[in-house]
Amino acid sequence: MELSLLVAPAGGADPVHSVDASLAARRTAGDFDVHVAGRTIPVQVRLAGGFGRQKKAGAAQGTGPQRITAPMPGKIVRVLVKPGDEVKARQGLVVVEAMKMENELRAARDGRVRDVAVTEGQSVDAGALLLVVE
């Protein structure tokens, strides 16, 4: 498997650099031990689009609006939905380019797009609201 890693210091600071490398990973108590270049590095993994993130109260029960936010600073490449669209779980909603990689953010569950707060070509900060699905 080939992965591109975005490396950032603990505490949510801005990314430091990206690395292309072959690696092996083993899950340990919710985090991972990554083995690369003969070293073992304990890491926490946060994947774009909400997979691997902790669920917010309400999201676990499938209630309340899904606020789709930018996982990191970047540029909106494509908006795949518009207000009023019905979406299915795991359907692509918006594509954000960050660190020369495109990240498709997906719906966590079925719903309807209530608001789209961004346009293609727009720059966004980490945590910026992109759209809302109810």
Image: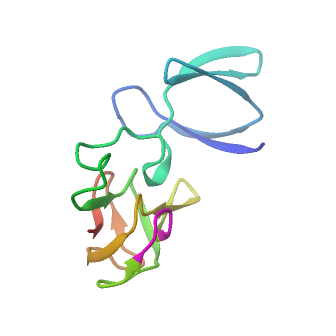
Q: Nearer the viewer, residue 13 or 61?
A: 61
Residue beneath the point at 26% across and 73% down: 117
Residue 101 horizontal side relative to residue 63, left or right: right
Residue beneath the point at 60% across and 17% down: 41
Query: In the figure, 40 relative to 122: above or below?
Result: above
Residue beneath the point at 39% across and 67% down: 110
Q: Spot the residue most to the front.
A: 61
Marker count (numbered)? 0
**Residues drawn in magenta:** 87-92
Q: Spot the residue most to the top.
A: 39
Residue beneath the point at 36% across and 67% down: 123
Query: In the figure, 6 relative to 49: above or below?
Result: above
Residue 2 horizontal side relative to residue 134, left or right: right
Q: Nearer the viewer, residue 95 or 51?
A: 51
What secondary structure is the stretch in magenta mostly built from?
loop
From the top left corner, tell me how far across and down residue 12 is, in percent.
Answer: 35, 34
Asked if residue 46 is among those painted magenta in the image, a careful observer would answer no
Asked which quadrant contains residue 79, the reply is: bottom left
Q: Nearer the viewer, residue 4 or 112?
A: 112
Q: Quadrant of the N terminus?
A: top right
From the top left corner, tell me how far across and down residue 53 is, in percent.
Answer: 41, 40
From the top left corner, tell me how far across and down residue 70 is, in percent.
Answer: 36, 57
Image colouring = rainbow
From the top left corner, tell me how far across and down residue 76 is, in percent.
Answer: 43, 70
Query: In the figure, 23 relative to 61: above or below?
Result: above
